[in-house]
């Protein structure tokens, strides 16, 4: 055994190998090689029991009414009646606020009438193109999908109604614009999200 020391008047000992202790044996405090007290923290209340005192919590606490904390307060993890962790998702999900670029559900829809002579700006800011659906047959004119001034996609002339295109969440880094010939007719729907 190593050199004896003392913590708050109690004898303490460093052992390079933990001693074997028998039932009812008196045991001195154990310290590490630097004299720090060795402890194994644990709570005084078992999981599933009513919470009391100030146990070390490694789980969560169920409160029918969540507590209100002040700035700088420490709080327990909160759970539901089935021990599922309660979380409050962010209210704004986008690349700027939380780096999320893959959304599980939902998107915007923009119906574009190709008879419109001017370019149709679906999004003036960066966007993700999820898909395209043709509502009405295209005339004998191709339709361009632009990112700013750059044509990224050309839909063929005379594309028929009911045609669907999965765009695999293509990123348009500047804007999302539909450009068609001034004589074009037909309509399509763009499914998109802001980036």
Image: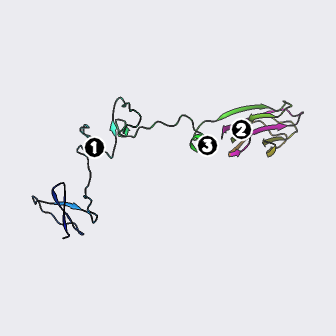
Main SS, magenta region, reads strand
- At 88% from the left and 36% from the top, the residue drawn is 181
User: N-terminal of the two: label 1 or label 3?
Assistant: 1
Q: Is residue 34 magenta?
A: no
Q: Which mark is residue 125?
A: 2
Residue 109 percent across, percent down from the top left: 69, 33
> Where residue 183 sits in the image (x, y, percent)?
90, 33
Residue behind mark 1? 47
Of labels 2 and 1, earlier in sequence is 1
Where residue 99 appears, as percent x and y from the top left, is: 58, 45
Residue 135 shows up from this direction? no
Residue under circle 3? Answer: 95
Q: Residue at x 74, y 40 (%)?
A: 175
Badge 2 element = loop
Image quarter of the C terminus: top right
Dot 1 and dot 3 residues touching (CB under 8 Å): no
Place residue 135 in its image quadrant.
top right
Q: Secondary structure at mark 1?
A: loop
């Amino acid at each position: 055994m190593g050199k004896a020391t003392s913590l708050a008047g109690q004898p303490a000992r460093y052992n390079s190998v933990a001693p074997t202790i028998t039932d009812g044996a008196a045991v001195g405090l154990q310290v590490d090689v630097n004299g720090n007290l060795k402890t194994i923290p644990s709570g005084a209340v078992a999981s599933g029991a009513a919470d009391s005192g100030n146990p070390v919590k490694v789980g969560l606490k169920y409160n029918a009414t969540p507590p209100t904390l002040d700035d700088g307060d420490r709080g327990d993890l909160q759970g539901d009646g089935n021990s599922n962790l309660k979380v409050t998702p962010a209210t704004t999900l986008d690349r700027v606020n939380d780096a999320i670029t893959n959304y599980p559900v939902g998107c915007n829809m923009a119906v574009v009438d190709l008879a419109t002579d001017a370019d149709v700006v679906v999004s003036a800011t960066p966007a993700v193109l999820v898909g395209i659906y043709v509502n009405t047959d295209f005339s004998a004119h191709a339709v361009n999908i632009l990112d700013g001034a750059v044509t990224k996609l050309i839909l063929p002339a005379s594309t028929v109604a009911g045609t669907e295109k999965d765009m695999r969440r293509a990123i348009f880094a500047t804007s999302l614009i539909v450009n068609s010939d001034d004589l074009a007719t037909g309509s399509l729907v763009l499914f998109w999200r802001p980036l």
